[in-house]
Amino acid sequence: MLLRFLAEQDPGELVDGLTALGRGVVYGGAAIGPGIGIGLVVGNAITAMARQPEAAGMVRTTMFLGIAFTEALALFGFVLAFILS
C-alpha cells in the first residue's frame, strides 16, 4: 500500500515532503534544550528570590540575561532548519 502510494507521487513531491519533515524535526529538537534551560533558570531564580528577597533585583537581572542567552540557542536551531532547505 505504501509503495503504491510512493510510486504515484511526482518525483519532487517526496523530496519536498521529507525536507519539510526534516526541518520540523530539527527545530523541534533544537527547541527542547532551550525550553528545559529556561525552566531551570527561572525556577532557580524564583528559589533564590524566595530565600533572599533583598537580592531580588540582581537575581531578576541575571535571570533575564540567562533567558536571553538560552533563547538564542532556539533561534540558532530555527535558522539551521531553514539552512537545511
Image: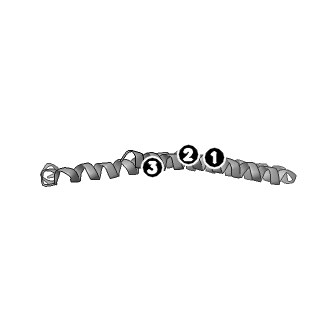
Quick check: marks 1 and 3 in contact, CB under 8 Å?
Answer: no
Count neighbours of disc 2 (C-alpha within 10 A) and say few if under 14, some if 14 to 19, many if 20 or more. some
Q: What element carries label 2?
A: helix
Residue at 42 percent of width and 48 percent of height: 81
Quick check: marks 1 and 2 in contact, CB under 8 Å?
Answer: yes
- Type of amino acid at the residue the image marks with label 2: Leu
Q: x and y percent of residue 9 in the render? A: 16, 54
Residue at 22 percent of width and 54 percent of height: 13
- Distance from the alpha carbon under mark 2 to that under mark 3: 11 Å
- Type of amino acid at the residue the image marks with label 3: Tyr
Chain-order first, disc 1 or disc 3: 3
Residue at 70 percent of width and 52 percent of height: 64
- Distance from the alpha carbon under mark 1 to that under mark 3: 17 Å
- Distance from the alpha carbon under mark 1 to that under mark 2: 7 Å
Quick check: marks 2 and 3 in contact, CB under 8 Å?
Answer: no
Question: Colour mode?
Answer: one colour
Residue picked out by circle 1: 69
Q: x and y percent of residue 11 in the render? A: 17, 50
Residue picked out by circle 2: 73
Residue picked out by circle 3: 27
